[in-house]
Amino acid sequence: MMRLDKVTRAAFDALEDVKARDIQVFDVKKMTAIFDKVIVATGDSNRQCRALANRVQEMVKAAGGKVYGVEGERTGEWVLVDIGAAVVHIMQPAIRQYYNLEELWAPPPKIAKAPKPAAVKKAAAPAKPRAARGKRAT
C-alpha cells in the first residue's frame, strides 16, 4: 500500500475498524490540486455507511486532523467525508458500481510500447552463377 500521512492513515484505519469492504486509495496529486488522495470504500447498508463516516470523523480528529465537510449522511447511500488532504467516499454496492469512481481516479493503464524492430538488412540479390553470366539461351 502507498505511504499515507497520519490523518489519511487514520481515515483508512477507521474504515477497516468498521469493516468497510473493498477499500481503495488513489494518489491523485497529479490529477487535481484540491486534494492528494481519494479513498473509496463500500458499506453494506445505510446504517453501516453512516457508522463508517462517523468513525472516520472521530479518528481523523483524534489524529489531529480536521473534517472540512460531510455530505450524504442523511440517506447513507453515498457519504463523502472531506478531510483536507483526502476525500473519503463511502458507498453502498449498487451506488459504487453505478458511479465507478475507480475508473475516474485510477491512473491510466500503462501501454506497453512495442519494441522497435531490429534494423532489417536488405538481403543482397543472390549472385548469378559464373556459367550463367553473359550467355544467351539458344
Image: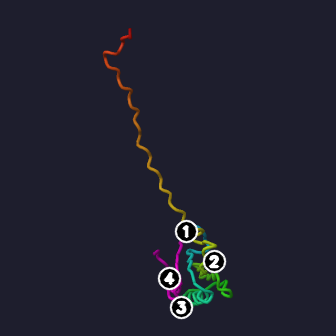
Q: Secondary structure at mark 2?
A: helix
Write down the residue under mark 2: 95
Q: Position of residue 82 (x, y in %)?
A: 62, 81
Residue at image point 54% right, 89% down: 59
Measured in 3D between alpha carbons, the distance from the residue under mark 3 to the one under mark 1, in whole angstroms, is: 29 Å
Classify 10 Å Cα crowding around label 1: few (below 14), some (14-19), many (20 and above). Answer: some
Magenta region includes residue 19 = yes
In this figure, which residue is indicated by the disc labeled 1?
A: 106
Which region is colored magenta?
A: 1-27
N-terminal of the pair, mark 3 or mark 1, is 3
Q: Quadrant of the C terminus?
A: top left
Tell us which disc is closer to us: 1 or 4: 1
SS label for mark 1: loop
Lower position in the chain sequence, tag 3 or tag 4: 4
Q: Which residue is mark 4?
A: 9
Q: How is the image coloured?
A: rainbow
Q: Between tags 3 and 1, which lies in front?
A: 1
Q: Position of residue 27 (x, y in %)?
A: 53, 72
Q: CA distance from mark 2 to mark 1?
A: 18 Å
Question: Which amino acid type is shown beneath numbered disc 3?
Answer: Ala
